[in-house]
Amino acid sequence: MLPLLRTKQFFPPKKLIQTTHFFFSTNNHHGPKTNHPSPPPIQVLLTESAGRGVFATRKIEPGELIHTAKPIVSHPSLASVDKVCYFCLKSVVKGSGFECREALFCSEECREEAKGFYEVEKKADWSAFVAHCRIRGLKYPLLAKRLACMVISGVTSAGSLDILQPERLSAEMISQMEEEFGLLRGALEDSGMTDEQLAFLNIEWYAGVLARIRINAFRIELAGGSYEDLLASAIASVESEAAVGNAVYMLPSFYNHDCDPNTHIIWLQNVEARLKALREIEAGEELRICYIDASMDRDARRNLLLNGFGFECRCPRCMSND
Ligand SMILES: [Zn+2]
Ligand SMILES: [Zn+2]
């Protein structure tokens, strides 16, 4: 227990940059359509020191579901691709899903929603691209591939991730991406896509997308059980067998990090993210999640945050040398 950390320091919001109603569904999505639930109790503001942040607009109770979020783009891990829905990542028992060539879907609804990328994707031969990713243990190029297919089919724009913070890439990192980019572009060219359809698909687009995916993607671990079961177990960002895939979200990406967070991001049955309060949050307080395994010691946390996310953690827990 860290009682002295329970009262959070937070920087006063500087300026409202946007309201966030476009980015999430409300927590009342099972209710009748005529029922207009109140918007989630949060707003996205600019902070003094950490760029954008998410702030409470009223007091939030411990355990409260703050909002849910659907991904901009998601993809199963290669190890899970024959076990989970190709669209929503829900577990599928083989033979019970709606199999559509090699892709597995949990429902007709997901198969319909997947048309936004799958109609383009299934025309191409991805074996070289997938083999490249598998051999090198790469997961993020799969998200870039799906996004490229979504752009080609017109369901999203080439700049749909631009609002997210990018990682600073070295020239060496970009040159390492050239081979996977070549395999991606080659697969689409060979499937009969025209130069006009692929006009956006250059190495600059690819590197820009990867730079955003690399620091904004969430590793999806499905809990399956109840939220209460989860309160005890920290969701870690380290590699785990339990991960079914990766996804990039808009609003959840605006949450800043804290090694002693007041908010938790969890997944129950599928890729829809649920943001839950871990304790009471005051109106005006910043909501923060933990990007890494909070049970690691201070040096390990700070190294991972610096190398993986590019910032030196100055959260109250780190500042108190815990
Ligand atoms: Zn599904
Ligand atoms: Zn910290």
Image (cartoon, rainbow, N blue to C red):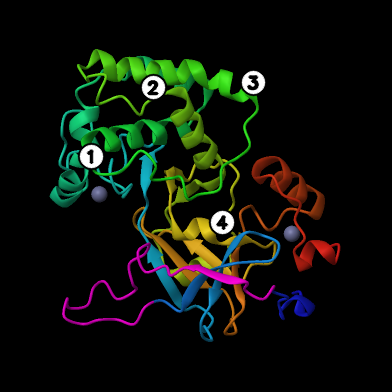
Part of the protein shown in magenta = 11-39
Mark 3 vs mark 4: which is more N-terminal?
3
The residue carrying mark 1 is 154
- Spatial distance from mark 2 to mark 1, Cα to Cα? 24 Å
- Spatial distance from mark 3 to mark 4, Cα to Cα? 32 Å
The quarter in which the C terminus is drawn is bottom right
Mark 2 vs mark 1: which is more N-terminal?
2
The residue carrying mark 4 is 235
> Which numbered dot is residue 130?
2
Q: Is residue 35 magenta?
A: yes
Taking depth in this image into account, of 105 and 36 the one nearest to the observer is 36
Mark 2 vs mark 3: which is more N-terminal?
2
> Which numbered dot is residue 40?
none
Residue 268, percent from left and from top: 39, 60
Q: Seen in the image, is 224 located left or right of residue 305?
A: left
> Which numbered dot is residue 172?
3
As shown in the figure, which amino acid type bears the numbered disc 2?
A: Val
Q: Is residue 153 above or below residue 91?
A: above
Mark 1 vs mark 4: which is more N-terminal?
1
Dot 1 lies on which element?
loop
Q: Is residue 78 visible?
A: no
Q: Seen in the image, is 217 located left or right of residue 198?
A: right
As shown in the figure, which amino acid type bears the numbered disc 1?
A: Gly
